[in-house]
């Protein structure tokens, strides 16, 4: 299969950078918050099969280096379904990391706050998700080399990793909330009526990414930790219009705090 062959080529390119067991995907406006020691970097366009981001705030590069005593892969920027890519292409990098030997995946994103009591600037651990995008990257022939036809999502967001993140956050004095993330397809922001419906379903956050990567990661047996930066009130919660500029401004304002959290957490992740 051509897709699997491209994945294997990409995985080999990743292995040429190192042998990381931990990967971190940095979302909107967060691309450069996590510098690594002895960093080796490749642009997405230099890795076989990797799609290229088209959205401001997404650098589109993969770096492998060390953080403390751990070798880490950092993906700076991500691919979104709304850019026009097929779901299987959106998760191509995550699947390549799985084939390259990554076992733990940390996903960060910018999200709108649906729950009353969530405010711009809050850091939220994702406890579960609702896939409202209408797409699933596992659709089509199963890639048995990666995982089973019907992967279980009972604990898609690893409870042990969330407990460790809460512990590290408490030690650093960083408040971490917890909530359910809903993915919409985008690129338009949601309507106030949609947000009211999502709240009734139990959603606390809304965004346009992350869920496809989680599905691909869990299919491949990777453990997942998700962290959202609440960048704005969702539609209808606040009176002013939503904008991507606001998203980038808030993520940049929270960059130092998220860097502190990740820098302390990653060296303490399970081997």
Image: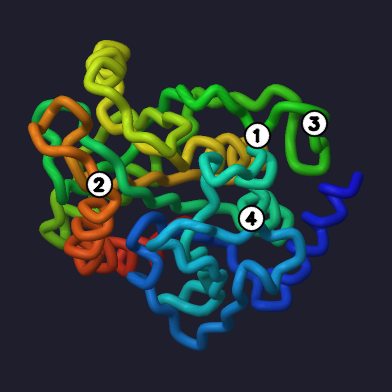
Task: Of the two numbered discs 4 and 1 on the same chain, state the one appearing first in sequence.
Answer: 4
Question: Badges 2 and 4: C-beta atoms under 8 Å apart?
Answer: no
Which x, y percent locates residue 245?
Answer: 25, 55
* Residue at image coords 38%, 35%: 188
Which x, y percent locates residue 236?
Answer: 16, 25
Mark 1 residue element: loop
Q: Residue under circle 3?
A: 142
Q: CA separation, marks 3 and 4?
A: 17 Å
Which x, y percent locates residue 215?
Answer: 58, 35
* Residue at image coords 10%, 33%: 238
Give the residue at the far right of this rendering.
Answer: 1
Task: Of the two numbered discs 3 and 1 on the same chain, state the one appearing first in sequence.
Answer: 1
Label 4 neighbour load within 10 Å: few <14, some 14-19, many 20+: many
Mark 3 residue element: loop
Q: CA separation, marks 3 and 2?
A: 38 Å
**The label number, if any, that marks residue 93 in the structure image:** 4
Q: Residue under circle 1?
A: 137
Q: CA separation, marks 2 and 4?
A: 28 Å
The answer, for residue 98, to whether it is visible in the render is yes
The mark lying in front, picked from 2 and 1, is: 2
The mark lying in front, picked from 3 and 1, is: 1
Q: Decide if residue 225 is on the left or right side of residue 122.
A: right
Work out whether residue 69 or residue 39 is closer to the camera in this orientation and state it: 39
Q: CA separation, marks 3 and 1?
A: 10 Å
Task: Of the two numbered discs 3 and 4 on the same chain, state the one appearing first in sequence.
Answer: 4
* Residue at image coords 32%, 48%: 110
Q: Residue under circle 2?
A: 243
């Amino acid at each position: 299969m051509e897709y699997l062959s491209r994945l294997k080529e990409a995985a080999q390119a990743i292995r040429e950078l190192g042998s990381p067991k931990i990967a971190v995907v940095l979302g909107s406006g967060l691309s450069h918050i996590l510098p690594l020691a002895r960093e080796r970097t490749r642009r997405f366009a230099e890795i076989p099969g990797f799609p290229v981001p088209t959205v401001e705030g997404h650098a589109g590069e993969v770096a492998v280096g060390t953080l403390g005593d751990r070798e880490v892969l950092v993906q700076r920027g991500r691919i979104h379904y709304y850019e026009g890519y097929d779901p299987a292409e959106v998760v191509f990098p995550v699947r390549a990391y799985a084939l390259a030997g990554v076992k733990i995946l940390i996903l960060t994103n910018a999200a709108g706050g649906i729950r009353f009591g969530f405010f711009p600037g809050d850091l939220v651990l994702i406890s579960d998700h609702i896939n409202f995008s209408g797409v699933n990257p596992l659709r089509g022939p199963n890639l048995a080399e990666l995982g089973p036809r019907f992967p279980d999502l009972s604990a898609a967001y690893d409870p042990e990793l969330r407990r460790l993140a809460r512990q590290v956050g408490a030690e650093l004095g960083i408040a971490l909330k917890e909530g359910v993330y809903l993915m919409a397809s985008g690129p338009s922001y949601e309507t106030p009526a949609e947000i009211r419906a999502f709240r009734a379903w139990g959603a606390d956050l809304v965004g346009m990414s992350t869920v496809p990567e989680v599905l691909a990661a869990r299919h491949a047996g990777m453990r997942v930790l998700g962290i959202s930066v609440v960048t704005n009130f969702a539609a209808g919660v606040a009176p002013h219009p939503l904008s991507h500029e606001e998203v980038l401004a808030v993520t940049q304002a929270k960059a130092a705090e998220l860097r502190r959290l990740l820098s302390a957490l990653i060296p303490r992740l399970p081997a």
